[in-house]
Image (cartoon, helix red, strand yellow):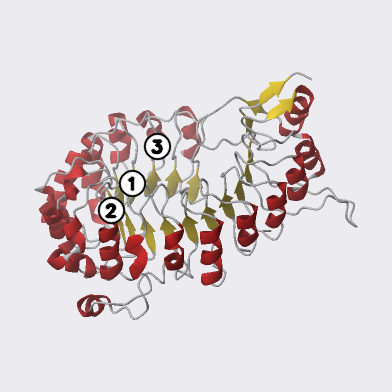
Amino acid sequence: LRVLDLSGSRGLKDGDLSALEGLTALTGLSLRCCTDVTGEGLWHLPRTVTHLDLSGCPRMDSSAAGPLARLQLAELRLRRCFRVTSAVLQAVVPHSILGLVALDVGFTSAGPGAVELLRRAADAGLLGNLRELGLARAGLEPEDAGVLRRAVGSVVTLDLERNGEVADSDFLRELLRGAGGGALRRLNLAGTAVSVRLFEGEDALVLAALGGLRMINLDSCPSVSDAMVAGLVRVSPWLEEVCLEDTPISGLGLRGVGRNEGEEVTRWSGVKAGAWTKMRRLCLNFTRVDDDCAEHIAKMSMLEVLELDVPGITDTALAEIVDGSRGLKNLYRLDLSNAKISDDGLAEVSKLTALEELEICSGLVTDAGVKHLEPLRNLRVLNLANNRITEESMKQLFPLKIGAENSAEVLHPHLRTLNLSFTQISGTHLVNALREGAACALSYLSVTGCELSASVRRMLQEEVGQLAGPRSSDDYVGPEKKVLVFGVEVRDE
């Protein structure tokens, strides 16, 4: 056994890790979101481990320094281990620095110490192998730009989320010059007040020089405007992933999509195709975009993920995007949670036969609209919360027709996650679907706010094996049929 993923093992304790001591070939281990594991449990890890993910372990603290110092780590992820301080890095980095490929200390207390360690390592020329660096909310200061510039020469993924000081254009210009060799592919600036100068004039040419850049995240950047988006389209036409979630843009900045203008930018990038026409992932959730942006999105025919959780989008925009892009044949995720999509919009969605994840919670969908989901045989995630659907929709999703082999017809054999919260279902057909195997792949089910009778509740308990109250947003997987029904409102018969 070389790689072991124990992510999300909520019952895992420090003592349980003693079972790993005999795995002398183990090199990769993920304890991501193992909420009860502490630094003391890491003493049980075999010395052969070189890739370790401890992200989201809230009890991990400086006690991890000792056991981690024993390991020659090439990858260490500590994101959201809030108690971890620079003491851990001081113990780990000197032993692993020559082979360190990935280091993520985002949202820990180790930020300032990490920068100092990187400075010393960069001065000694020891960061040639570093490919991924995560410094989210690290408290970066203006003078850190020079240090990081020397550290990011070979970095492919750079995460600077929630660092207010990177708002300064001079900081980013200095930093990005270090990535001018073209290695940088992914840049996360979420939650920073990025300066408009980064997309205009000489500063823009620094961004344009990053010809290898494929992803930029500007989520929750309050200073992002339509003008800045227009500049981004112009200076980075080759981008494949862009997140503009929760920014005050209206979509006017997308007017340059499909164009190829600016001789200086073209010389840097070598791009001949239209700007953003190779886009694979676009997130515009919680923005001010409306139907007017549809014609620009339609030019992104290679989209795999499209997130439009905005009330300004209607059936009209959806039809224009689907038809104008020739069907978005690669699209596997579509988020229209709060868009004003009705049954007519679902008729357009039915053309997207590659879809695996669909979210529509507008309250405008009825049983007539759910019929249009039949062609979507690859669905894995379906969110229809808040819509006016009844048991008739359950019959359409999970038909119980008996086939030649005397088994229920499985219309959506891959459907694992289903959200029916605050709908008008009674649950009776859902029980039968579970019993007959028509919902055979289901692993997460939400019926929060649905009025279920006591008898249906009992039957669901029998079929599901677990009926719980409201939980956090983290997915929970039950021990038997692995179906969670939560937040059930029971009415007396």
Q: Looking at the image, which is closer to me, 365 or 40?
A: 365
N-term-proximal mark, 1 vs 2: 1
Q: Are marks 1 and 2 in contact (CB under 8 Å)?
A: yes
Secondary structure of residue under mark 3? loop
Which amino acid, mark 3?
Answer: Gly
Q: Looking at the image, which is closer to me, 467 or 293?
A: 293
- How far across and how far down the image is residue 216, in percent? 32, 58
Q: Quadrant of residue 452?
A: top right
Q: Quadrant of residue 231?
A: bottom left
Q: Report the residue at 68% width, 46% height from top.
A: 366
N-term-proximal mark, 1 vs 3: 3
- How far across and how far down the image is residue 168, in percent? 14, 51
Can the viewer see residue 417? Answer: yes
Secondary structure of residue under mark 1? strand
CA separation in Å, label 1 and label 2? 8 Å
Which amino acid, mark 2?
Answer: Leu
Which residue is the extreme one toward the top?
492
Left or right relative to 364: residue 150: left
- How far across and how far down the image is residue 82, in percent? 31, 32
Q: Which residue is mark 2?
A: 100
Can the viewer see residue 184? Answer: no
Q: Report the residue at 41% width, 47% height from top.
A: 286
- How far across and how far down the image is residue 133, in percent? 27, 52
Residue 171 versus residue 477 in the image, above or below: below
Q: Which residue is mark 3?
A: 56
Q: Report the residue at 50% width, 41% height from top.
A: 6
Which residue is the extreme one toward the left?
143
Q: Are marks 1 and 3 in contact (CB under 8 Å)?
A: no
Which amino acid, mark 1?
Answer: Leu
Neighbours of disc 1 within 10 Å: few (<14), some (14-19), many (20+): many
